[in-house]
Image (cartoon, helix red, strand yellow):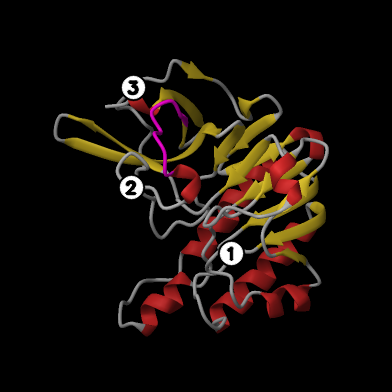
Amino acid sequence: MPKPTLIESKTHSPLPVELAPGFHAIDLGLYIAADDCLVISDLQLGIEEHYNSMGVMIPRFNFIEVKKHFKKIFEKKMHFSHIVLDGDIKHEFAKSSNQEWREIIELLELLSLHAAHISIVKGNHDLWIDPIARFAKVDIHNQGLYLEKSNTYLCHGHEIPQTLEYEKATTIVIGHDHPAIELQEGAKREKFKCFLVGKYGKKRLIVLPSFNFAAVGSDPRVAALSPFLKQNLDSFQAWMVEDEVYAFGKLKDLP
């Protein structure tokens, strides 16, 4: 995919880019410095087997791209105290497919080389991920995970958590929506995965781009799925991810 050339970024800097104080973008992952924690979301491993079973023949490339992007992250920072998979690790809503088992286990083995601790926060696609997590001896959290040092609550974003830790957190990190901004210049259109940073009530809200490569994502200005994003998003800041991370300003100012 070409570099984002439709709008010139006013603030272009080498990774990691600071999205908010203490919160940095490293490729498609979010690094939370106080907790030395990397957070990624929406891998949707096994998506090709799902489509193949429906008669749609697509090659199995998503996990290959996932590993390439983790390699880019680990070239920036080799080791983390904690890596969190923030929901929709798998694609099937029901049973876990053979492809999901193989790829998730391989992924967790890879991540274990780069993190002292790995956690899974369940997303709406992860109803049957518990057996895989138990097999891999990985912590799993049904509603979300609280990071004490940064006072941050990690949840997938398909529902509003009902926990005391969520209530006291000052920053919320979600996935679920696969945000991607479509830019147009004349007849040319390009879409780019992006981070979004704004507010939900009095809390800072950070929305992660998807870590899956079967699709770029959807424009939050057109439709938003998460209840966290059922609000006016004009003041949300967008950072687009390509070869690097580019600050593109507020959503209301984008064409």
Across and down, in percent, residue 141 comes to 72, 63
Q: Earlier in the sequence, mark 1 or mark 2?
A: 1
Front residue of this view, candidates 223 and 66: 223
Q: Secondary structure at mark 1?
A: loop
Query: Residue 89: which numbered mark, if any?
Result: 1
Mark-to-mark CA distance, 2 and 3:
17 Å
Span of residues in magenta: 230-238
Q: Residue at x 37, y 80 (%)?
A: 52
Q: Residue furthest top?
A: 10
Residue 34 point in image, percent of width and height: 80, 34
Disc with the residue nearer the chain's start (2 vs 3): 2
- Nearer to us of marks 2 and 3 is 2
Residue matched to label 2? 223
Whether 83 is among the magenta residues is no
Amino acid at the residue labelled 1: Ile
Quick check: marks 1 and 2 in contact, CB under 8 Å? no
Give the residue drawn at x 67%, y 32%.
23
Q: Amino acid at mark 3?
A: Asp
Q: Residues within 10 Å of mark 1 (few under 14, many from 20)?
A: many
Q: Position of residue 42 (x, y in %)?
A: 53, 57
Residue 119 against residue 136 in the figure, above or below:
above
Quarter of the picture containing the C terminus is top left
Name the spot of residue 160 as percent of width and height, x first: 57, 52
The three-letter code of the residue at mark 2 reads Ala
